[in-house]
Image (cartoon, rainbow, N blue to C red):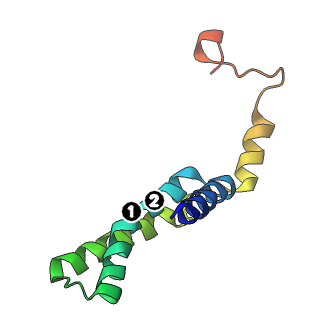
Amino acid sequence: MVANTLVSITLLLAMLRDGEAARVSALFFLVPPLAALIAWAMLGEDLDSLAWAGMAVAAVGVAIATRGEGKPSEDAASERRRRRPRGGRRRTMLDGGH
Protein backbone atom coordinates (compact mmCIF):
# COMPACT_ATOMS: atom_id res chain seq x y z
CA MET A 1 0.00 0.00 0.00
CA VAL A 2 2.80 2.42 0.85
CA ALA A 3 4.58 1.53 -2.40
CA ASN A 4 1.47 2.47 -4.42
CA THR A 5 1.34 5.85 -2.72
CA LEU A 6 5.03 6.50 -3.31
CA VAL A 7 4.76 5.56 -6.97
CA SER A 8 1.67 7.68 -7.54
CA ILE A 9 3.09 10.76 -5.80
CA THR A 10 6.38 10.38 -7.68
CA LEU A 11 4.49 10.11 -10.96
CA LEU A 12 2.40 13.18 -10.08
CA LEU A 13 5.47 15.25 -9.26
CA ALA A 14 7.20 14.16 -12.46
CA MET A 15 4.14 15.12 -14.49
CA LEU A 16 3.93 18.50 -12.77
CA ARG A 17 7.62 19.12 -13.43
CA ASP A 18 7.35 18.25 -17.12
CA GLY A 19 3.87 19.57 -17.90
CA GLU A 20 1.54 22.37 -17.03
CA ALA A 21 -0.16 22.13 -13.67
CA ALA A 22 -3.64 22.77 -15.10
CA ARG A 23 -3.27 20.02 -17.70
CA VAL A 24 -1.97 17.56 -15.11
CA SER A 25 -4.66 18.38 -12.56
CA ALA A 26 -7.35 17.79 -15.19
CA LEU A 27 -6.33 14.13 -15.17
CA PHE A 28 -7.68 13.83 -11.61
CA PHE A 29 -11.18 13.95 -13.09
CA LEU A 30 -10.47 10.52 -14.59
CA VAL A 31 -9.98 8.85 -11.20
CA PRO A 32 -13.68 8.08 -10.46
CA PRO A 33 -14.44 6.77 -13.97
CA LEU A 34 -11.33 4.59 -13.94
CA ALA A 35 -12.19 3.24 -10.48
CA ALA A 36 -15.67 2.37 -11.75
CA LEU A 37 -14.21 0.65 -14.83
CA ILE A 38 -11.85 -1.39 -12.68
CA ALA A 39 -14.71 -2.39 -10.37
CA TRP A 40 -16.79 -3.36 -13.40
CA ALA A 41 -14.00 -5.40 -15.00
CA MET A 42 -12.53 -7.07 -11.93
CA LEU A 43 -15.38 -7.26 -9.45
CA GLY A 44 -18.36 -7.62 -11.75
CA GLU A 45 -19.91 -4.35 -10.57
CA ASP A 46 -23.05 -3.37 -12.48
CA LEU A 47 -22.92 0.04 -14.17
CA ASP A 48 -26.11 1.62 -15.47
CA SER A 49 -26.36 3.83 -18.54
CA LEU A 50 -26.03 7.01 -16.46
CA ALA A 51 -22.65 5.83 -15.13
CA TRP A 52 -21.40 5.11 -18.66
CA ALA A 53 -22.63 8.52 -19.82
CA GLY A 54 -20.90 10.20 -16.89
CA MET A 55 -17.64 8.43 -17.74
CA ALA A 56 -17.91 9.60 -21.34
CA VAL A 57 -18.56 13.20 -20.26
CA ALA A 58 -15.57 13.11 -17.91
CA ALA A 59 -13.31 11.66 -20.62
CA VAL A 60 -14.39 14.27 -23.17
CA GLY A 61 -13.89 17.05 -20.63
CA VAL A 62 -10.38 15.88 -19.80
CA ALA A 63 -9.56 15.53 -23.51
CA ILE A 64 -10.67 19.11 -24.12
CA ALA A 65 -8.77 20.42 -21.09
CA THR A 66 -5.52 18.67 -21.93
CA ARG A 67 -5.29 19.27 -25.66
CA GLY A 68 -2.43 21.50 -26.75
CA GLU A 69 -4.38 24.06 -28.79
CA GLY A 70 -4.47 27.64 -27.63
CA LYS A 71 -1.06 27.41 -26.03
CA PRO A 72 1.19 30.28 -27.06
CA SER A 73 4.11 29.22 -29.20
CA GLU A 74 7.76 29.76 -28.35
CA ASP A 75 7.93 32.35 -31.14
CA ALA A 76 5.16 34.39 -29.54
CA ALA A 77 6.85 34.24 -26.14
CA SER A 78 10.19 35.34 -27.54
CA GLU A 79 8.48 38.17 -29.44
CA ARG A 80 6.91 39.44 -26.20
CA ARG A 81 10.33 39.38 -24.53
CA ARG A 82 11.86 41.35 -27.40
CA ARG A 83 9.16 44.03 -27.24
CA ARG A 84 9.58 44.49 -23.48
CA PRO A 85 11.27 47.81 -22.77
CA ARG A 86 14.85 47.73 -21.58
CA GLY A 87 15.58 48.57 -17.97
CA GLY A 88 14.02 45.47 -16.43
CA ARG A 89 10.67 47.02 -15.54
CA ARG A 90 7.50 47.34 -17.55
CA ARG A 91 5.95 50.72 -17.89
CA THR A 92 2.39 51.00 -16.69
CA MET A 93 -0.38 53.53 -17.18
CA LEU A 94 0.67 55.15 -13.90
CA ASP A 95 4.20 55.65 -15.26
CA GLY A 96 2.86 57.34 -18.37
CA GLY A 97 3.37 54.29 -20.58
CA HIS A 98 0.57 53.36 -22.96
Q: Is residue 69 left or right of residue 74?
A: left
Q: Is residue 55 left or right of residue 13?
A: left
Given residues 86 and 18, the one toward you in this image is: 18
Up/down of 8 relative to 34, above or below: above
Q: Which label was assigned to residue 29?
A: 1
Q: Do the residues labelled 1 and 2 touch (CB within 8 Å)?
A: yes
Q: Position of residue 13 (x, y in %)?
A: 63, 54
Q: Where is residue 1 in the image (x, y as percent from the top left)?
A: 50, 65
Residue placed under numbered mark 2 in the picture: 26
Given residues 6 and 26, the one toward you in this image is: 6
Q: What element carries label 1?
A: helix
Name the residue rendered at 58%, 56% in the picture: 9
Q: Which amino acid type corresponds to the residue marked 2 in the rendered image?
A: Ala
Given residues 33 and 89, the one toward you in this image is: 33
Q: In which quarter of the image is residue 80?
A: top right
Q: In this view, does 44 lie to the left or right of 5?
A: left
Name the residue rendered at 23%, 84% in the picture: 45
Q: In this view, does 11 lie to the left or right of 30?
A: right
Name the residue rendered at 16%, 83% in the picture: 49
Up/down of 39 relative to 88, above or below: below
Q: In which quarter of the image is the C terminus?
A: top right
Given residues 60 and 9, the one toward you in this image is: 9
Q: Which residue lies furthest to the right in this view?
A: 86
Name the residue rendered at 42%, 66% in the picture: 62
Q: Which amino acid type corresponds to the residue marked 1 in the rendered image?
A: Phe
Question: Crowdedness of circle 1 by 10 Å Cα count: few (<14), some, many (20+)?
Answer: some
